[in-house]
Amino acid sequence: MNKFTDANKREWFIAIDYPTSERVKAELGVDLLDVKGSWSQLGELPVLAEVAWALCKSQAAEREVSRDNFWAALDGDAFEDLLAAVVGAVIDFFPRQKREAMRKTWEKLQERMNKQADPAKLEAAIDAAIDEALTELSGK
């Protein structure tokens, strides 16, 4: 089961079936079963927050958690775990043969994102860009 924990230490379960995917598409215009399109959309935090609410609102109603309260508890760590839970639920929806390829694709994407998030590499890239810009500006 795919789940995430919000900043208030509440655990939320994410599951996707065909009716749920159709409801999310109708309400938000996000087609969770269009993996290429939805994975790029889910990288945008406002879209991810809306999708999370659509997927968790019945759990929230049982707990008497409002949409604003739900969203207020989505901090950086919760968003990271939420994205993994939503993508995991999307992957779990598909047949076994596709799931394996999709999991590998997701893992590779995560690896690439983690490499880009390496502070030392990021700082080196920024320094190189600054040096290049200064060289251009100085005419040398």
Image (cartoon, rainbow, N blue to C red):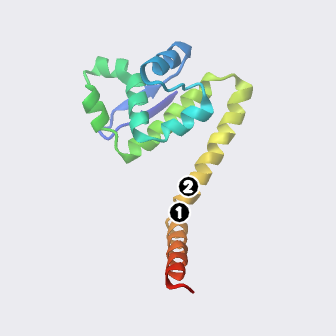
Q: In which quarter of the image is the C terminus?
A: bottom right
Name the amino acid type tagged 2: Asn
71 lies above or below 117: above
| Lateral position of residue 96 relative to residue 1, left or right | right
- Decide: is 117 above or below 124: above
Give the numbered dot on residue 43: none
In the picture provided, is 62 more to the left or to the right than 124?
Answer: left
Q: What residue type is labelled 1?
A: Asp
Secondary structure, mark 2, is: helix
Give residue 48's quadrant in the image: top left
Task: Using the image as rendered, state which of residue 56 and residue 50 is in the foreground.
Answer: 50
Image coords of residue 34 (percent x, y): 60, 27
Viewer-closest of 81 and 129: 129
Identify the residue position indicated by label 2 in the image: 114
Q: Give the CA distance from mark 1 to mark 2.
A: 6 Å
The reply to whether the C-beta atoms of the residues labelled 1 and 2 are less than 8 Å apart is: yes
* Percent position of residue 106, x then y: 62, 41
For the point 25% across and 21% down, the residue is 64
Residue displayed at 50% across by 36% down = 41
Q: Return the residue at label 1.
A: 118
- Residue at x-position 47% and y-position 24%: 29
13 to 103, vertically: above or below = above
Q: Where is residue 3 in the image (x, y as percent from the top left)?
A: 46, 31
Q: Where is residue 54 in the image (x, y as percent from the top left)?
A: 40, 23
At 61% from the left and 31% from the top, the residue drawn is 35
* Badge 1: residue crowd in 10 Å (few <14, some 14–19, many ≥20): few
Left or right: 50, with 125 as reference point: left
Residue farthest along the top direction in this orientation: 19
Question: Is 106 on the left-hand or right-hand side of 1?
Answer: right
Q: Which residue lies most toward the right here?
A: 97
